[in-house]
Image (tube, rainbow, N blue to C red):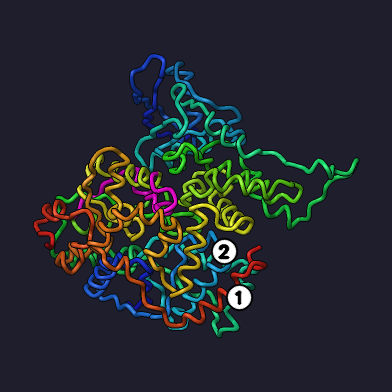
């Protein structure tokens, strides 16, 4: 399987461990990642708020790059997935399409609307398939209770994202089960992490993040796992603030999606960049008989 | 022919703040046809099993919006939620009052916080007294003008969105999805003359606390799509006033930030949003993150084809294009 790899900004910057883990897992599963040094940022929802048509046009350019190469686009971020899918959808409005085409044609870019945008979670569950993944598990995550945390833009609006149930998604939990882990079901798994207002209203953002982490903890999770690096920033890098907001310690290790897959497939914690997390992952790694990197 | 029934197990939230120390969940089991609405089942419980069960309802036809409650944790109208699919996905039916509004008794909440936010946006047309409507004539709108707010009049004020909203849950000052969707309706109404004032007031009053998580759009039984109308409001507010709040500075700052290299310059964005004072207040956290993730201070590489990105901005990010 060959896909246009759209890492997004964070995985190329402060969330580099997500990129490391993605490459490791894709290599292990025979997914060829084709890189394009000309992809730009998806706008992360913020450009959409400032100028909707500009946001669609920037993403149409990204989609056109993959289209020209005849490849579907692989995202590793719920927000990138949401923004690129939304561009495809909004381009079905002839008025939006005309303005976007008007900006792209003079620079020699044409987007015909054929690029499919797929998040890694969906590729793993639908294209690679759980039986194939199960067969490659070298280090079953037995005894590890993991709370999946989906990230809003992978699921909602449900009629626009057009994948699994936005209220009762199952793909991540089924994947965790295939890896040998015990999925934890809790309300917070489909809620918001607070990230969009982390720098706008930090105290509200921390209350929201704290609530979801606390919910996972109350339901018995040893760790959380997310397919979105922005959720990871809220849940891991700002977990100390979230703990302050809920008034007690949380101590919740938070993995990126390909890190849990990589651990089960036999990657070392170093290869997955676990030392880069703000919240130590030792407690979770101890349960599956491996050690965190120094 | 007798209709096939299923055994439906209900767990219903019971609480009277005047007499109960804490809420409890009461179980009821009924044989029901799978298409029975949850509201009908609750009314049968009240009529045949337990007359003390308290709930609010009226039309039973998804028109009045009175019977919004949480069914298996989702905020929705009990009258249009059938027991069959709920049993299929959860094995039982947990019925609870809406969130974000204090419980008066059992499934009835005090909607005062919801209506207070609605009142605060002045939910009526504001006309210019110096230019009264011409006597005996209607103020006609074009189909295109009406089309701009075709979704919002469908709102039945059931408060399901208010109940589902994580920003309301974490910040009592946030207007909530319904009030903001209604505000949008008046802002784009060509007859209303207070557009600028409305946009000016809503920016500091919580517009930018919206997380665009779309939980409101998912909860809405009438497909009003509040989160998408809040997005429209944000763009209109920036256009009307520029970036005057942390939220609008963040959105505009982000747009300018990625224009420079094609990718996000993370630490620069914090400065663009919060200014130097904000940067200083985040210093401790920044150092913690930097120790593990030193890239946070580095600028990303310039993407190839940055000139194309610049030309897209030049074509679409002009003042006259953002209408």
Residue A44 is left or right of residue A143, and the answer is right
Q: Residue at x 29, y 42 (%)?
A: A244
Q: Are marks 2 and 1 on the same chain?
A: no
State which region is magenta.
A181-203
Q: Residues within 10 Å of mark 2 (few under 14, many from 20)?
A: many
Q: Is residue A40 above or below residue A169?
A: below
Q: Which residue is mark 2?
A: A51
Residue A136 is left or right of residue B287, and the answer is left
A188 magenta-colored? yes
Q: Which residue is mark 1?
A: B315
Query: Can I make out residue B82 in this image?
Result: no
A191 magenta-colored? yes
Task: Point out the image quarter for the C terminus of chain B.
Answer: bottom right
Tell me where residue B1 appears, x and y as whole percent: 51, 34
Toward which corner of the image does residue B117 lie, by quadrant?
Answer: top right
Toward which corner of the image does residue A151 lie, by quadrant?
Answer: bottom left
Q: Which chain does the residue under circle 2 lie in?
A: A
Which of B71 and B249 lies nearest the eye of the viewer?
B249
Tell me where residue B151 appears, x and y as whole percent: 63, 49
Q: Residue at x 68, y 46 (%)?
A: B186
Query: Can I make out residue A157 in this image?
Result: yes
Element class at badge 2: loop
Which of B146 and B185 lies nearest the eye of the viewer?
B185
Cα–Cα span, label 2 and label 1: 12 Å
Q: Residue at x 18, y 54 (%)?
A: A280
């Amino acid at each position: 399987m060959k896909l246009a790899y759209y890492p997004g900004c964070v995985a190329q910057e402060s969330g580099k461990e997500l990129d490391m883990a993605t490459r490791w897992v894709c290599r292990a599963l025979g997914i060829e990642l084709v890189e394009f040094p000309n992809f730009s940022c998806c706008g992360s929802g913020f450009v959409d708020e400032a100028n909707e048509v500009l946001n669609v046009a920037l993403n149409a350019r990204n989609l056109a790059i993959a289209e020209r190469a005849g490849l579907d686009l692989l995202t590793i971020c719920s927000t990138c997935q949401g923004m690129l899918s939304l561009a495809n959808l909004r381009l079905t409005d002839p008025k939006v399409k005309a303005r976007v085409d008007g900006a792209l044609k003079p620079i020699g870019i044409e987007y015909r609307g054929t690029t499919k945008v797929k998040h890694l979670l969906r590729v793993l569950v639908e294209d690679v398939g759980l039986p194939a993944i199960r067969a490659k598990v070298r280090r079953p995550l037995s005894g590890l209770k993991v709370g999946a945390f989906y990230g809003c833009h992978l699921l909602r609006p449900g009629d626009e994202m057009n994948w699994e149930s936005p209220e009762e998604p199952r793909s991540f939990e089924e994947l965790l089960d295939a890896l040998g882990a015990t999925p934890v079901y809790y309300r917070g798994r489909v809620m918001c992490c607070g990230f969009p207002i982390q720098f706008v209203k930090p105290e509200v953002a921390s209350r929201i993040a704290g609530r979801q982490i606390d919910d996972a903890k109350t339901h018995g999770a040893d760790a959380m796992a997310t397919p979105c690096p922005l959720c990871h920033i809220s849940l891991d890098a700002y977990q100390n603030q979230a703990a302050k907001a809920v008034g007690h310690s949380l101590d919740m290790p938070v993995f990126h999606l390909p890190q849990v897959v990589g651990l089960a497939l036999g990657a070392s914690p170093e290869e997955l960049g676990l030392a880069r997390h703000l919240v130590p992952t030792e407690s979770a790694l101890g349960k599956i008989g491996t050690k965190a990197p120094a | 022919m007798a209709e096939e029934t299923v055994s439906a197990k209900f767990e219903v939230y019971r609480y009277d703040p005047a007499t109960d120390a804490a809420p409890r969940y009461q179980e009821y089991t009924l044989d029901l046809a799978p298409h029975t609405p949850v509201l009908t089942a609750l009314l049968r419980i009240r009529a045949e099993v337990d007359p003390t069960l308290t709930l609010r309802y009226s039309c039973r036809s998804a028109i009045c919006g009175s019977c919004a409650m949480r069914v298996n944790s989702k905020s929705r109208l009990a009258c249009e939620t059938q027991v069959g699919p709920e049993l299929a996905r959860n094995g039982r039916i947990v019925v609870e009052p809406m969130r974000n509004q204090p419980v008066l008794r059992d499934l009835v909440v005090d909607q005062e916080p919801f209506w207070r936010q609605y009142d605060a946006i002045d939910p009526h047309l504001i006309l210019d007294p110096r230019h009264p409507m011409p006597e005996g004539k209607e103020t006609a709108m074009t189909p295109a003008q009406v089309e701009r707010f075709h979704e919002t009049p469908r709102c039945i004020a059931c408060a399901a969105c208010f109940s589902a909203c994580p920003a309301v849950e974490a910040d009592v000052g946030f207007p909530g999805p319904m009030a903001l969707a209604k505000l949008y309706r008046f802002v784009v109404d060509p007859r209303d003359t207070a557009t600028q004032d409305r946009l000016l007031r809503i920016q500091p009053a919580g517009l930018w606390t919206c997380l665009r998580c779309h939980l409101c759009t998912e909860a809405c039984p009438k497909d009003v799509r509040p989160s998408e109308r809040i997005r429209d409001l944000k763009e209109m507010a920036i256009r009307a006033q520029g970036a005057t709040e942390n939220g609008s500075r963040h959105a505009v700052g982000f747009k300018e930030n990625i224009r420079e290299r094609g990718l996000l310059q993370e630490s620069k964005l914090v400065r663009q949003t919060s200014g130097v004072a904000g940067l200083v207040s985040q210093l401790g956290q920044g150092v913690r993150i930097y120790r593990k993730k030193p890239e946070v201070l580095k600028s990303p590489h310039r993407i190839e084809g940055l000139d194309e990105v610049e030309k897209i901005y030049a074509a679409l990010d002009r003042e006259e294009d953002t209408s």
